[in-house]
Image (tube, rainbow, N blue to C red):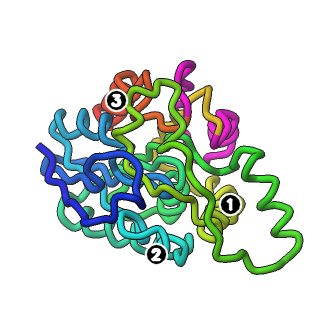
Amino acid sequence: MFHSRARAIAQQRMLGHGEMELFAEGRAPAVVAFHGFGGTAAELRPVLDAVAGAGYAVDAALLPGHGTRVEQLQEQTFDSWVDASRRRMQAVKGKHGRFVLFGFSLGSLIALQLAAEHPEGLAGLVVLGNALTLAPLMNVPFTLWQRIGRQMPDAYLGKPRPGDLADESAMDSLVTYDRHPIRSAYEVYRAGPRVRALVGRIQCPTLILHGRRDIVCSWKNAKWLTEHVGARDVSVRLFERSAHVLCCDGERDEVARETLAFLGRL
């Protein structure tokens, strides 16, 4: 069903095994999907499989700096991710007319930014594990560094496991770098306030999904976004047994059902 694109990568630089980009032909509204920081479309696959199986077109390409070498990710900025994603969105719009933006974690910030621009053809927005505010473990050091006002160094932190899952049975299906590049992670932190200032402009139907056990981006982000997004048509659901990588966690079938129900009523 999916057309996948594999990349040649030094194995020691990656964790997990799976396809990194996912594409499916189908009907509108097409789903333009953006994965998380350091990850790939593999972390979205269970839900996107269901979306494609229901006949919708899917475009889930790698964001710049992902799926190659972690050093390339270190050089990216939030603007470089948004610009590349905008081009993907416009290409899908040209082919299918109507589309839905579907963003996870870093991808949620990209999707929110693009939705706030009111692009022609936008039918809806789905955000999962949104990264408008990071957990204290990351937020506090980055806040202190910002106050210092110095340039972030070219440094990396080892990644002990591919992702934050309550149900670890899907852990090996996640394909991510084995290290966090700190300078580009700082870009995710800095994007939070920027996007929070824009969400009031979003007018399209919006579905907000989050795992209650998320230790990367608190479930309270979902509550905040529900209260501040400009759209009148807003649905939110917290998944009590799931953590950050919502599409692959134990309640992934329910996440897929919520997504399909949302697409169906559009």
Which residue is labeled 2 in the image? 72
Which residue is labeled 3 in the image? 256
Q: Position of residue 90 (x, y in %)?
A: 31, 69
- Position of the C terminus by quadrant: top left
Q: N-terminal of the two: label 3 or label 2? A: 2
Nearest-to-viewer mark from 3 and 2: 2
Decide: is 12 above or below 44. below
Dividing the picture into quadrants, the one containing residue 236 is top right
Horizontally, is 4 left or right of 105 in the view? left
Nearest-to-viewer mark from 1 and 2: 2
Q: Is residue 234 visible?
A: no
**Which stretch is magenta?**
216-243
Nearer-the-camera pick, 80 or 122: 80
Q: Position of residue 263 (x, y in %)?
A: 31, 36
Which residue is labeled 1 in the image? 189
Decide: is 122 above or below 173. below
Q: Position of residue 253 (x, y in %)?
A: 34, 23
Residue drawn at (65%, 36%) of the image: 215
Which residue type does callout 1 highlight? Tyr
State the CA–CA distance, disc 1 to disc 2: 18 Å
